[in-house]
Amino acid sequence: MKKNFVQKIANWGNYPVVTKNIRTADTLSAIRSFVEQHNEVIARGNGRCYGDAALAENIFSTARLNKFINFDRINGIIECESGVLLADVLDLIIKQGYFLYVTPGTKFITVGGAIASDVHGKNHHSEGCFSDYLISFKLMIEDGSVHNCSESENAQLFWSTIGGMGLTGIILSAVFKLRNIETAYIRQESIKAENLDQIFSLFEESDSWTYNVAWIDCLQTGNRIGRSILMRGEHATRNEIDAKKRETPYVIKERLLPSVPGYLPSVLLNRFTVKLFNKLYYAQQRQKKTENIVDYERFFFPLDAVGNWNRIYGKKGFIQYQMVIPKEHGRQGMQEILSAIAESGNGSFLAVLKLFGKNNPFAYNSFPMEGYTLALDFKVNLQLPTLVAQLDTIVEKYGGRIYLTKDSMSKNSLTNYLRNVENPKFVSLQHKRILNSTITSQTTHGTNSKRNRQ
Amino acid sequence: MIVLGSNSEVAQAFVEEVLQRDGNLEKLYLFTSEPELAHKFAQHLQVKYLQESEIVMLDLTSELNFSRFERVESSLLFCAVGYLGMGSEEGLYDTKNTTRVLDINFSRLIPLLTHFAEKMERRRGGTMIVLSSVAGDRGRQSNFIYGSAKAGLTAYLSGLRNYMHHRRVHIMTVKPGFMRTKMTEGLPLNPVLTVTPSRAAANIYTAYRNKRNVIYVLPVWRLIMFVIKNIPEFIFVKLKL
């Protein structure tokens, strides 16, 4: 068998699928020589971003950078290599009474990915992004040298790398702060909202809760548009959990992980099944409001319980469309977005609505801005580009933007917002696509200011 | 625990498996020829399990003097030493490649294993888990230098097991099949026949606890190799395996 590093590869959405050179290494010298020998390099963690972000002509997988380096158990500060999964971090720290300050909807992303995407969670309105708890990281830049980056050291490299989608170099390791917890449980309240107005006012009045997120039925129309369930939560204290759990407050019941065995036929996901799913999901909660104690896995990572859930969208894959619309236009914008989706019939069964708080002005490449954000899954089909273009127009009209970590087909005017990342060595397919469409649109507008990257 | 080839991903996964299941080890010796990676792993174990370990430098291509391992002793040894080298197409007539493959997989490894086997015999107890390969089950045109070294290793382990059985030392031969590791990076592996290092480590741990003698990490390999071993030579010689 001959070695061949050129392989078929796709991120979590299975769209697009490309054939590119992918390598991994664990010694500094091997990583350096990969960087020196290749152009158009991007680092890739666990491939849990959705579109074409972590793909490039030459991909460096951080899979083998999976070691812990230090854990200050007294002050709750951890240092690890960039390929360590948040799941591994949680496994280690929860027993010690710590939790991540910010975690996205899956724990199967790497620490490097969390920085490059500057991930946000259900607590953005109260606690910001991953970078708000990041102390420093080590970055290998285009000449193979390694730089320690923090607010005080190589500050520009620090801030441009945060949310910078890997375009500044390869993150090798990172140091970040952890939060204290008394238990591994969350005190959760679920409240039903019949329409957009109700869910918006629920978000406003839940501002003092640490975690807020809403599941939204995106196929409803008329005065039921925005029908949803808000879930809000706080880390449960020792007194709030029952006596039996109190004996081992940091240990939760292990769940058996079912897994989607293969790609399901994509016809299974259609307007009717999604509608049915949404109806059942909404109906399963009988009362207007319920309160309960759930373990952190169920609250933060419900989807992680199903292995390879991305396969339910079939072989052609799916995209995730996540946008943010500034708060003042949130109501109007969401109304239009949801109407457009319901009209198209291309429903998403995982539609998640959140209210972002103020952004950190230093982290200028981070996606969040104060406003409403909606994340939707769409199966890839022939009509999808039209729907995306339609949604993009609405987002643009209200001054919003698209989350690059999930993007694979949105308009460049909504995705070309990164600063200080121009670097001929580190280029992803996504970045190339965005720049190319910038060039095309500029040319059609009569300007000749092509950006020459080499 | 003594780990030979401690930068191997299976070896590392196995160490973690043992630490998770059995708690901390009194002594952990990490044998390696690449100190940078071994230090990283040692630190990782310290952070994750508060496990102390000692790094022992060993380069099998240059060393045959084992007297400096006098104080290295444990009742459990895991050996993941292995070197694939070049396949027959590129490497058959390259003497340097051949020697290196034979040295690391067999001729210099055997005296080392014997050195630790003797210590276990003296303390009348212990387990040696050694990774051999399915490639040693029958020589195939694609990589028979590596295969023959592993065949030699398998035969050695079989004899050693027989010898040590009466001296209360358990010898386990592990035939991994395909594993997604550094060694196989870039090779087109069939996903059904391939395990991750952590899955392999879990299976090896179970077999170790059950005192198994020879295991294929994925049971399907036993069947595959049964078929391959039993193809008559006059047919086998015509095949391209």
Image (cartoon, coloured by chain):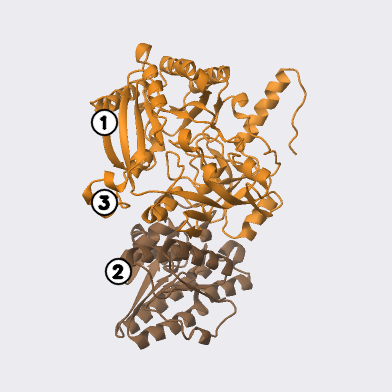
Q: Amino acid at mark 3?
A: Arg
Badge 1: chain ID: A
How far apart marks 1 and 2 lie (CA) works out to 47 Å
Secondary structure of the residue carrying tag 1 is strand
Q: Which residue is mark 1?
A: A290
On the same chain: label 2 and label 3? no
Q: Which residue is mark 3?
A: A246
Name the residue rendered at 29%, 23% in the picture: A279
On the same chain: label 3 and label 1? yes
Question: Mark on residue B112?
Answer: none
Are there few (<14), some (14-19), or many (20+) residues within 10 Å of tag 3?
A: some
Q: Colour of chain A?
A: orange
Tag 1–tag 2 contact (CB < 8 Å): no
Residue A95 higher or lower than A189, as above or below: below
Q: Amino acid at mark 2?
A: Arg
Residue B4 higher or lower than A305, as above or below: below
